[in-house]
Amino acid sequence: MSLSIGIVGLPNVGKSTLFQALTKKEVNISNYPFATIDPNVGVVQVPDERLERLSQLFHSAKTIPTVIEFVDIAGLVKGANKGEGLGNQFLARIREVDAICQVARCFSNADIVHVEKTVDPMRDIDTINIELELKDMEADEKRSSIPESQLLSRKPTLYLLNCDPKDVSKELQEQLKKLGSPYVIANLKDELEMQQLSEEEKKEVGFVSNLPEFIRKCYELLDLITFFTAGEKETRAWTVKRGALAPQAGGVIHSDFQERFIKAQVISWDKLLEAGGYTQAAAEGWVRTEGKEYAAQDGDVIEIKHG
Ligand SMILES: Nc1nc2c(ncn2[C@@H]2O[C@H](COP(=O)(O)OP(=O)(O)OP(=O)(O)O)[C@@H](O)[C@H]2O)c(=O)[nH]1
Ligand SMILES: [Mg+2]
């Protein structure tokens, strides 16, 4: 199960810069509006310290993280719903994603063209959100029966403020809080440029990336949890929607595990580390046997027993 996040915003605000920093894919990040025409699609690993520690415990030959798919979409402008700019044809692309990351430009730089001439992130956020709502209304008027989950204005949204944290005013933070969606602040130009440096060099210049936090927030936005399978051959992180029952969790690993589910052996990742292995954990009585009504919990290490 790979969930996808659409990167949305006005032209020339840093969407493709974010996409490239996340996916390490070379894309067009030229300094002009509508540099991106066809959407870029890429997959990003979800950083997870728990996975690393479990893998170390078992000296696993393979360590496999879960992934999120990102889609870098063409810039939207005021009137996109009526066909202004390139917006209209790509608004449809946003329907297919599970959640939206809206990039808002907060950085000042006279050399980078702003389609509205001035830097005003709240105005830009309103512009985009109105376009999404207008497009939904249009669909409603046409009576095309778009399912609720595909309504653009109902998609879970995360805002990315493209600038240094010091450039985000209290007022903007208050306004964002009112929107009720989470936000992350990252200087995307730095994020991309600093990837050229080694870990040591980053320490020297005091650069800490905000992208891991951003990816984690995306994960929360999608209301996903991670469970693990762990052993010598492979330690792997898996993704399910919060509330998924043990057989569904099994089904993510292999469809047989869902159909022929018998029971699940479950232990929390930290308990398994504390015990130092399955045998020791079982001796402590920390490995639980759960049936098909069990809802998988974030951080569970699960072994499915199937027929
Ligand atoms: N100074 C500064 N420039 C940035 C920052 N982020 C992006 N840029 C520059 O802004 C320009 C546009 O960046 P892109 O990532 O292509 O913007 P986009 O939103 O994908 O643009 P379109 O595809 O045209 O909609 C590039 O020249 C970037 O280097 C930033 O944080 N600071
Ligand atoms: Mg672009």
Image: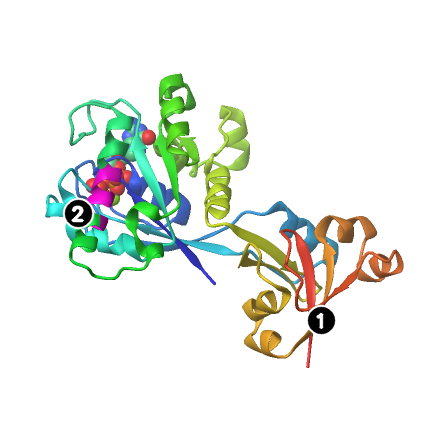
For badge 1, the amino acid type reads Lys
Tell me if I can see residue 16 in this picture. Answer: yes
The reply to whether the magenta stretch includes residue 135 is yes
Q: Residue at x 20, y 36 (%)?
A: 31
Q: Is residue 238 above or below residue 291?
A: above
Q: Nearer the viewer, residue 279 or 261?
A: 261
Eye-nearest disc, 2 or 1:
1
The secondary structure that most of the magenta stretch takes on is helix
Upstream in the sequence, badge 2 or badge 1? 2
Circle 1 SS class:
strand
Marks 2 and 1 sit apart, C-alpha to C-alpha, by: 49 Å
**Residue at 15% over, 32% down:** 115
Q: Which mark is residue 263?
A: 1
Is residue 38 visible in the rendered structure shown here? Answer: no
Q: Position of residue 298 (x, y in %)?
A: 62, 51
Identify whether 45 is placed above or below 258.
above
Foreground residue, 261 or 276? 261
Q: Which residue lies under the disc numbered 2?
A: 87
Residue 176 image label: none
Q: Residue furthest right?
A: 283
For residue 173, which quarter of the picture?
A: top left
Q: For the residue marked with disc 2, what is the amino acid?
A: Gly
Residue appearing at x 54%, y 59% in the figure: 240
Q: Is residue 215 left or right of residue 142?
A: right
